[in-house]
Image (cartoon, grey):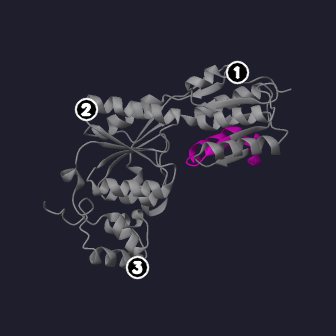
Amino acid sequence: MSSPGPRRTTIKDVAELAGVGVATVSRVLSGGSASAETRERVLDAATKLDYRPSALGRNLRQQRSGGVALLVPDITDGFYARLCDGVLSCARSYREPVTIGVTGDDAEQEADLVGGLLEQSMDRIIAVPTGDGEMWASAVRAGLNVVFADRRVWSPGQHARALDEVPAVLTDDRSGLRTAIEYLTGLGHRKIGFLARQGMSHRVAAFREAMGDLLDEDLVVFARASRDSAYAAAAGLFQRRADLTAVIAGGNMLGEAAVLAARELYVRIPRDLSLIMFDDVPWAELCSPPLTVIAQPASDVGYRAAELVLRHGRRPRTVSLPTELIVRSSCAPRR
């Protein structure tokens, strides 16, 4: 039996030897910005390992392996599960396979996944982005065909031009939050909180804008991308601010955490606290009381993003899909 040949050096091997992240190696090898010291370390490591970048050094569109990569923060989240379903549905009609990667809203994990896709010469990516503009700008310069979904990356300065060309499929958060806050203030609420998690800077900005003079920054709280962190954020807010009368959860995991925290702290919904949640997931209507939600067309977001990454020709810069406030029983007049 013949012994297997030597393992091919990967971009991760270069990153480990140079003592930097995969995103930094990608950036240096694709001509992006880096300090002279970092550039020297990366190039020296690549030389020592005889690294031959199969994707970064060639035109990806001529060498692509086929298929589409989809990067999402959490596959167990109902919104992202439906977004994935939309991508898969569209890709089936094009007879293209889909590879799904989970970032956990962690920028380093995202960079590792993007580096792996570069290694595989897979050039079409749909991403709910987590990392900064520098990493994504480097990926675009390397030849990746990127479409952002649900969020986009904004970067001033030297990376703005590269990212400005990346199409995005978004929902109209500003309109959804404005409608929700008008509904709550119409019920007499003034102390309105917002539960957010990593990656929701666009949604937090829309909340601040919609609140205007009523905004209390102490009522805007952040959680990491886990159920435990979401619960801790919700419970901490409810315990710290007894004057809170309404809260908007920025996603269904945060809404779930708010319901659980309220139950365990004997906060009655809607008698003591009115609650509105982003995402109309099935359990929202089964809650007691059923939750008022800002519904987003998650499957349509995925489908439209897949259309943009798969079709040829001119593509729109941004596709904005509407949200809808579905009123149920989780809100009541302020007592």
Up the image or down, 304 lies above or below 292; here it is below
Q: How far apart are marks 2 and 1 (CA)?
A: 42 Å
Task: Mark 1 vs mark 3: give the one in front.
Answer: 1
| Residue depth check, mark 2 versus mark 3: number of the one nearer the observer | 2
Q: Earlier in the sequence, mark 2 or mark 1?
A: 2
Q: Measured from the top left, where is residue 157 in percent x and y?
A: 47, 62
Tell me the quarter of the picture where residue 252 sits: top right
Q: Which of 201 and 212 is in front in this view?
A: 201
In the rendered image, the vertical position of residue 283 relative to residue 118, given as above or below: above
Image position, residue 211 (x, y; %): 71, 39
Q: Are marks 2 and 3 in contact (CB under 8 Å)?
A: no
Please indicate whether residue 202 sits to the left or right of residue 237 in the image.
left
328 falls in the magenta region: no
For the record, the magenta segment spans 195-219
Disc 3 target residue: 36
Position of residue 293 relative to residue 243, above or below, is: above
Residue 201 is covered by the magenta coloring: yes
| SS for dot 3 | helix
- Tell me which label, 1 or 3, sits earlier in the chain: 3
Disc 2 target residue? 94
Residue where numbered disc 1 is placed: 288
